[in-house]
Amino acid sequence: MKGKGSPGGRRKGKNGGSFHIGAILGSSFSSLGIAGKLREHSIRKAWAGCVGENISRKAAPSRLIGTTLYCSVVSSPWMAELSFHKQSMIEKINEKLGYPAVSEIVFKLGPVEPPKQAKVVAAPVKELSPSDREFIEKAASAIKDEGIKKAVKRAMEKAKG
């Protein structure tokens, strides 16, 4: 978030020097114990992209303590399989986050919520007025190619609607 009238979120301090708001927030988060929760949230958010959709349906991060990530896994066979991939999972997570957030992963049997799919919300369809339809017909009437004419009419209908 950028500060008002200052590039990159920099503000003027009391003595005329500048400070970066991100640095202040970062140190505040550490002193309040929020930094670990933010790292945990970042890992949860990046999980499916790091391990793939198939694994994310069978295993999920449950807790981060220090740099040890505890993950719930749906079954013992999956725990055995994931133990073979542990090091590459750690590397992918750390690469995605850009810092060494995880040094160890501990797998435990437990419930795994399927990854949440982004909901696609269709925009409400607005009925075009007769004058809008007349305008679109008139504008498209000069186009000779029927395919292009239909495409232009659809685009104009969407823009008006």
Image: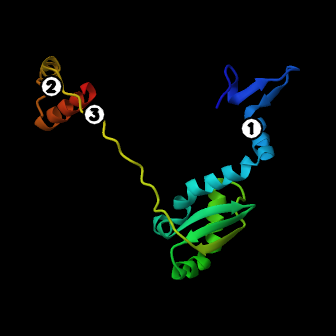
Q: Residue tagged by mark 2?
A: 140
The answer to whether marks 1 and 2 mark residues whose Cβ atoms lie closer than 8 Å is no
Q: Position of residue 141 (x, y in %)?
A: 11, 24
Query: Can you identify the residue that label 3 sits on?
Result: 124
Give the residue drawn at x 72%, y 47%.
34
Residue under pointer 1: 25
C-alpha separation, residue under disc 3 versus residue under disc 1: 40 Å
Compared to 12, does 153 lie above or below?
Answer: below
Residue type for callout 1: Leu
How far across and how far down the image is residue 10, in percent? Answer: 74, 28
On the image, the x and y values in percent for residue 47 come to: 56, 60
Quadrant for the N terminus, please.
Answer: top right
Are the residues at dot 3 and dot 2 in contact (C-beta closer than 8 Å)?
Answer: no
Which label's residue is closer to the chain start, 1 or 2?
1
Amino acid marked by disc 3:
Pro
Front one among 147 and 66: 66
Q: CA distance from mark 3 to mark 2?
A: 25 Å
Dots 3 and 1: beta carbons under 8 Å? no
Mark 3 burial class by Cα count in 10 Å: few <14, some 14-19, many 20+: few
